[in-house]
């Protein structure tokens, strides 16, 4: 089975001189509409917690994963030079809706 979508792989040089493999989702991002979910005002959220016994937070700087829907995994396909196909299991960076979905 061959996927309808293939994502380009690009090599990007990092500031330390090493290379990083990245995916170019430009074509896929053009096809899908942008989800518009504005972020809450953080100061208002913190102020509304007054009087509660516990306050928890999520460290979004470390790592997060949004699992891909089974039907959408095919759209996240990359191919190697030996014609092996790989699909992302979680939303990768580079998709325009990853942040809003998170």
Image (cartoon, rainbow, N blue to C red):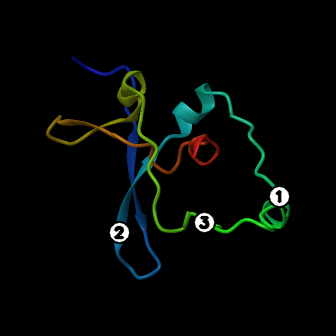
Q: Which numbered disc flags the more N-terminal residue, 1 or 3? A: 1
- Considering every residue shown, the one lying at the far left of the view is 82
Marks 1 and 2 in Cβ contact (< 8 Å): no
Between the residue at mark 1 and the residue at mark 2, the CA separation in whole angstroms equals: 37 Å
Q: Residue at x 54, y 67 (%)?
A: 59
| Image x and y of residue 75, in percent | 41, 29
- 99 relative to 70 in the view: left or right: right
Give yes or no for contact between labels 3 and 2 (Cβ–Cβ under 8 Å). no
Q: Is residue 70 above or below residue 51?
A: above
In the shown orientation, is residue 79 left or right of residue 19? left
Q: Secondary structure at mark 2?
A: strand
Tell which residue pokes out farthest to the top in this image.
1
The residue identified by callout 2 is 19
User: Which label was assigned to residue 56?
Assistant: 3
The earlier-in-sequence mark between 3 and 2 is: 2
Dot placed on the residue nearer the N-terminal end, 1 or 2: 2
> Label 1: which residue?
41
Residue 42 picture location, percent across and down: 78, 63
Residue under the point 59% across and 41% down? 101
Residue 36 relative to residue 30: left or right: right
- The residue mark sitting in front, 1 or 3, is 3
Residue 6: image location, x then y, percent? 37, 31
Q: Position of residue 46 (x, y in %)?
A: 78, 66
Disc 3 and disc 2: Cα gap in Å? Answer: 37 Å
């Amino acid at each position: 089975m061959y996927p309808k979508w293939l994502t380009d792989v690009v090599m990007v040089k990092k500031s330390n001189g090493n290379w990083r493999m990245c995916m170019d989702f430009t074509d896929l991002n053009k096809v899908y509409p942008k989800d518009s979910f504005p972020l809450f005002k953080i100061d208002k959220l913190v102020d509304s917690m007054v009087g509660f016994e516990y306050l928890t937070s999520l460290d979004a700087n470390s790592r997060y994963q949004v699992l891909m829907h089974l039907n959408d995994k095919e759209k996240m396909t990359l191919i190697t030079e030996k014609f092996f196909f790989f699909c992302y299991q979680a939303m990768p960076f580079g998709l325009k809706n990853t942040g809003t979905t998170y």
